[in-house]
Amino acid sequence: MAIEAQAAAASPSSGRKPAPPSLAAAALRKSFGGVEVLHGVDLELHPGEVHALLGENGAGKSTIINMLSGRLRPDSGEISLNGVPVSFRNPLAARRAGVSVIAQELELVPTMSVVENVFLGAEPTAYGLIRWGDAGRKVRAVLRELGLDIDPDRIVSTIGVADQQLVEIAKAIIGDFRVLIMDEPTSALNLSDTERLFKIVRRLKAAGVAILYVSHRLWEVFDIADRVTVVRDGNRIFTEEIGNTDVRAVIRGMLGTKSSLLEGAERDRAPRMSHAASAPAIELRGISSGGLLKEIDLTVAAGEVVGLAGVIGSGRAELCEAIYGLRSIDAGEIRLRGAPAVLAEPRRSLSQGTFLLPEDRKLDGVFADLDVRENVILNFVAEPTKGKASGLNVIRGGIERSAFSAMRERLGIRCPGATAPITALSGGNQQKALFARAVLSKPSVLILSEPTRGVDVGAKEEIYAAIDAFAAQGIAVIVSSSEIGELIRLCDRIQVLRGGRIVGQLPAAQAAEQTILEMMAG
């Protein structure tokens, strides 16, 4: 097999003392800014086991992962590797000890090649020279096993987000390791890529690798995991064999008292109103772009939510970018509120009331050098007041602070404070911060590309409610998502793309996941 992970920790022979956990955490505690966020958490990963770690955004999962992988040191508690206490100075030390991590946020260097990224810091050498030929062959073999056939010398910035995710996975599973931590590994993958990854996971499990699996897609957890640990508000709620629990129990553990509120919201949700008679907010007529998009016709009425379904590479992500001005349009016309519009670049799109929530929040969404509030209010312009002395217009900081506080409460953004770095937030809370930015831009057309990627079940409902509220206010919403159930839940109509063309349309109320999948696959 192409993957080189061959674990030494096989099951013990009959009569022998059971092998210690491959990786164990005992009574881990961690504080930030004097506030304890992790309260004595225990966790054990055994050889040949897939152990799922579940919880809301901000529940403590990322803190646990960062301590197990050497990014953070616990304030108290102990981490042991094969029964021996360890203290990793940094992620490289953890990797050399046999703990490999697939990070939730891509950690690739965009200006370097695929093979350089995969072997960064661990380049194979002979007589002081890097053996790039051998490295390239190993990378190509692993990527093919993951379903990606690309040149290892290709620059990472020239490939899409989904392919970059596969490169990130390849980086983690090349080399020797006994523990694999997988943090949202399928967030950018389609169904076929996910199935290929699961085959590799099962192969690693059979080889004795201990796997910690973190995902907000609960169906994945019940498909691949042997045990599950649920954390909430920095506490371990329970650890259970996967066969002894179910989705409802997991959700109750994750959300606590909020689970009943979520169930009530789902039960009491009003049916969507028809927007057939509403005026078009945006019209695409014969849009072609970059050799992929071909003669796209699409109309979205004010107050309507239209979904874009399609496999990765179908053109749905590219269509969102073309509408927003991130991709040049070679032919066709865009009309906003009945008038021709030229959305040649994002600034012009914003000025005309069109906002895009990007697919890749780390690369295209958050500003890592700014704090949480600055990221949220980036496109928010308060009503100016006249300066008494100079006559200059000034932005009232109090209004900005109030706007941020309102969005923080409305969307449940969990952060240490308004001035905390955006990078200190979990991935899901970063996503909610970007969504808050969209709200404050006051768009008439809102384009959402994978709006709930990396977001937990409770936060998803908060975002869904916000999207419903947008539509109720008369805003036209376009949602591109790899989750078919999400499109059915959110949308009035679903457009299916394949090969850069719209190949079908279904009313969401009458759509079945199987039908949409068949249209996507052709």
Image (cartoon, rainbow, N blue to C red):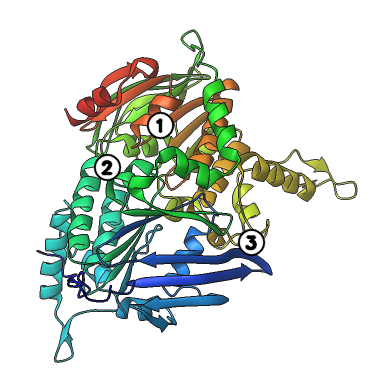
Quarter placement of the C terminus: top left
Give the CA distance from mark 2 to mark 1. Answer: 14 Å
* Labels 2 & 3 near each other (Cβ < 8 A): no
Residue at x 16% of width, y 70% of height: 4
Q: Position of residue 144 (x, y in %)?
A: 13, 56
Give the CA distance from mark 3 to mark 1. Answer: 31 Å
Say which residue label 1 marks. 486
Q: Position of residue 400 (x, y in %)?
A: 72, 46
Quarter placement of the N terminus: bottom left
Q: Quadrant of residue 117?
A: bottom left
Q: In the rendered structure, which amino acid carries the disc numbered 2?
A: Asn
Say which residue label 2 marks. 190
Left or right side of 40 for 185: left
Q: Position of residue 202 (x, y in %)?
A: 20, 56
- Is 460 placed above or below 92 here? above
Q: In the rendered structure, which amino acid carries the disc numbered 3?
A: Ala
Can I make out residue 474 in this image?
no
Residue at x 35% of width, y 29% of height: 308
Say which residue label 3 marks. 420
The local crowd at label 1, few if under 14, some if 14 to 19, many if 20 or more residues have their Cα within 10 Å, is: some
Q: Earlier in the sequence, mark 2 or mark 3?
A: 2
- Is 268 placed above or below 312 here? above
Left or right side of 214 for 258: right
Q: Quadrant of residue 183?
A: bottom left
- Helix, strand or loop under label 3: loop
Q: Position of residue 393 (x, y in %)?
A: 78, 45
The one nearer the camera, 457 or 12, is 12
| Name of the residue lying farthest toward the front | 15
